[in-house]
Image: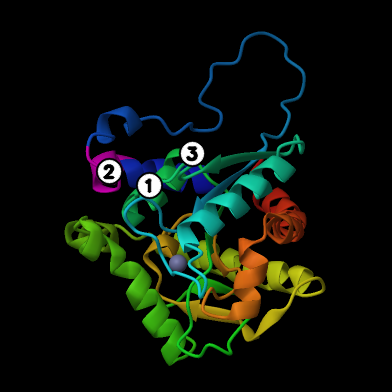
């Protein structure tokens, strides 16, 4: 039977965690992924409870990479961090879900390290949160991406290209990691994660779409580096466009951000619960 955590731990074993880890973090990561059922059983125990679903939230950008800058100067890295912190807080009271964040402060985290972090935590679901700029200032609304080699359109392709460049611009070489990753992709895991990502994207958009303004074609795809885990269902959510004055007004207001985070948390919770493994 397919088990995500087993695939993740094999990936880490094959690669050595150094391939995904940020410099200096490799040693700490090695061997730290729990393998279900690896504990020796002692005497009669009550039936094991299902472990909570592990959700990794990824606030886009950070540190020296501000991301998009809004029409009145709002920085994407602050918007994404604030939304993720609110989602974590809202999911915190749910005993069936455990939330981790790739960053909890204004820090620059290379893209492969974000994926490595999710592997390290044995994530059942990876959600990357963004609020980028669009070439057309009129474009507004929330949309969600799953990974695909072929982007939904030119804008999606350029957006992913620009996001993927941040490591080249801000100082992390992804070349070697990409090659090593490509060499060990496991088809079964990849297909499974891909289908789960599509379904998660659809459910989140359908649910959130009842409450917030959506982009015209909200279910999108592009080759984002943070969505490339072959083992973890991954979705990137563009919460809106900082290049649009109305979206920026919403995204810079702590109250509107918290509301948006609540709508997202309400959708993420059932998706994660369905993805968790026994
Ligand atoms: Zn972004």
Please state which of the two labelled residues, at mark 2 or mark 1, is closer to the viewer. 2
Which residue appears farthest toward the right when viewing the image?
210
Q: Which residue is identified by label 3?
A: 121
Q: In this picture, which residue range is highlighted in magenta?
A: 13-23
Classify 10 Å Cα crowding around label 3: few (below 14), some (14-19), many (20 and above): many
Frontmost residue, 156 versus 244:
244
Q: Is residue 127 in view?
A: no
Task: Estimate the x, y position of residue 172 in percent, counting from the top left.
Answer: 22, 55
Q: Is 243 situated above or below 278?
A: below
| SS under mark 1 | helix
Q: Is residue 247 left or right of residue 68?
A: right
Density class for disc 2 (Cα within 10 Å; few <14, some 14-19, many ≥20) is some
SS category of the residue bearing label 3: loop
Q: Residue 132: percent from the left, percent from the top?
A: 48, 72
Q: CA distance from mark 2 to mark 3?
A: 15 Å
Q: Could you tell me which residue is drawn at 67 percent across and 68 percent down? A: 250
Circles 2 and 3, Cβ within 8 Å, touching? The answer is: no
Question: In this figure, which residue is indicated by the disc labeled 2?
Answer: 22
- Residue receiving disc 1: 116
| Count of labels in the image | 3
Q: Nearer the viewer, residue 249 or 152?
A: 249
- Judge by depth and name the residue closer to the eye, 43 or 5: 5
Marks 1 and 3, how far apart in space?
A: 9 Å
Q: Are marks 2 and 1 in contact (CB under 8 Å)?
A: yes
Q: Where 56 falls versus 140 (above or below)?
A: above
């Amino acid at each position: 039977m397919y088990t995500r955590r087993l695939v993740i731990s094999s990936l880490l074993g094959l690669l050595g965690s150094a391939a995904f880890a940020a410099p200096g973090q490799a040693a700490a990561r090695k061997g730290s992924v729990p393998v279900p059922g690896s504990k020796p059983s002692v005497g009669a125990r009550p039936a094991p409870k299902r472990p909570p679903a592990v959700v990794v939230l990824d606030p886009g950008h950070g540190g020296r990479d501000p991301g998009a800058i809004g029409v009145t100067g709002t920085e994407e890295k602050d918007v994404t961090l604030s939304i993720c912190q609110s989602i974590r807080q809202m999911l915190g009271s749910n005993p069936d879900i455990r939330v981790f964040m790739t960053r909890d402060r204004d820090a620059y985290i290379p893209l492969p390290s974000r994926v490595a972090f999710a592997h390290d935590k044995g994530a059942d679901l990876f959600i990357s949160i963004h609020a980028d700029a669009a070439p057309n200032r009129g474009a507004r609304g929330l949309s969600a991406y799953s990974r695909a080699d072929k982007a939904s359109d030119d804008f999606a392709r350029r957006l992913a290209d620009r996001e993927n460049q941040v490591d080249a611009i801000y100082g992390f070489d992804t070349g070697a990691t990409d090659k090593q990753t490509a060499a060990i992709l496991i088809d079964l895991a990849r297909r499974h994660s891909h289908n789960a990502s599509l379904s998660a994207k659809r459910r989140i958009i359908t649910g959130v779409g009842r409450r917030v303004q959506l982009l015209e074609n909200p279910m999108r795809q592009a080759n984002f580096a943070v969505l490339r885990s072959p083992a973890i269902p991954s979705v990137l959510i563009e919460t809106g466009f900082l290049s649009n004055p109305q979206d920026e007004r919403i995204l810079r207001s702590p109250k509107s951000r918290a509301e948006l985070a609540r709508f997202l948390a309400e959708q993420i919770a059932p998706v994660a619960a369905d993805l968790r493994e026994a």
